[in-house]
Image (cartoon, rainbow, N blue to C red):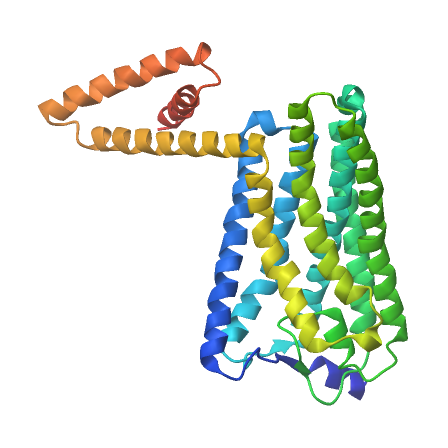
Amino acid sequence: MGDENQTAEIQFHFYPFSPILEVQIFIFVIFLLLYIGSLVGNATIFLTVWAEHSLHTPMYFFLANLAFLEIFYSSTVAPLALVNLLTMGRIPISFTGCGTQMFFFIFLGSADCILLGIMAYDRFVAIRDPLRYTLIMRWQLCAQLSAGALVLGFIQALQLTVLIFHLPFCGHSIITHFYCDVLPILRLACGDTQTPEAMLFIISVISLTIPFSLISISYIFIVAAILKIRSAEGRHKAFSTCSSHVTVVLLQYGCCSLIYLRPSSSYNPEMGRVVSVVYTFVTPFLNPLIYSMRNKELKDALNKVSVSWLLIQYHKSVYIFLHQYHSTCITNILYHLYNSWINLSIQKITTIKRSVMGEGAQMLSWYISTK
């Protein structure tokens, strides 16, 4: 009982990157920009897929799920890491807080890796059997695959976190890392760590080795199918669609494999901390850029939604201004003229459904009707 109380009272401190405050602040700025960029980029992709009906396909459904996961995945690590960079590691994290952070990191990270494997299967079906693609990748199946990734990640995270935090912790409580990762925490445990290490290896195989093997096999068939496409434009479109996914896969799986698929005895804390920056800060930041820059459909949808949003904001500001100041003669005339113009724009929606002006007027008419 006394050992359990002692363990529960432990507070962990994170070892700073550098003893020099200026270096810490420089790293803080880099991390903050990467974190903000990942939040903005992934939220933009998620909202664009949600708002643009032409992107309501299995491929973009999984991409939106990936963006949604990345937002919470990076938010599990980044806020506390940023705080400790500014305070030189003086802000501790409780025993319970460390376990909670580890659970969500494993949960979301595992689901992220499994989802990348599912996305490879989706591309394989689309290129290998395009005529039966919609029959195979039904919405029900897509939802089940996404839910399965979350459930599997949840089970893995729960098992490993419970095993680790049932170990006794004593002595020093300095974590040579910027978040509660598995291997740095195991180095602080006093008891036998063979069972958690074995579980970590099993989870790494399930979340990294198996999906990466399936992805590699899928891309062998994908490349063979692409080479059979007669038109150069078709081959280019197929390669551009898959190349963005391959780039993300190599970054994610490559860096994670360097840490979690090696024997724990060979773990290097300093190297582990540097490599972890890639898949906690860099990859979530690069994912939206890679997918948006190398995907013409997504770029076009982003431009369309952006222009439509700006047009709506302009219409709203003008309408609110004229609505508030239409007491004078001139603004009263402008107010009625603007109303007439809006009504005319609304009538044109039936014939110009896909145009940006039509969509802006349609959403504006909804806004006016709610007032």
Q: Nearer the viewer, residue 219 or 201?
A: 219
Residue 4 drawn above or below residue 109? below
Residue 93 sits above or below residue 228 on the image: below
Residue, far left: 329
From the viewer's perspective, is 371 left or right of 180? left
In what quadrant of the picture does the C terminus appear? Answer: top left
Q: How far across and down, in percent of the image, does residue 350 sit?
A: 45, 11
Q: Quadrant of the N terminus?
A: bottom right
Q: In which quarter of the view is residue 22 placed?
A: bottom left
* Residue 180 visible in this rendered orientation of the protein: no
Q: Vertically, is 42 above or below 314?
A: below
Q: Residue at x 38, y 11 (%)?
A: 347
Q: Residue furthest bottom?
A: 171
x, y percent for residue 168? 80, 82
66 over 132 or under it: above or below: below
369 on left or right of 338: right
Q: Residue at x 31, y 32 (%)?
A: 314
Give the residue drawn at x 28%, y 16%.
Answer: 341
* Left or right, residue 206 beside residue 25: right
Residue in the foreground of this view, choosing between 196 and 204? 204
Residue 193, given in percent of the width and then of the height, sits at 86, 77
Q: Quadrant of residue 121?
A: top right
x, y percent for residue 325? 17, 31
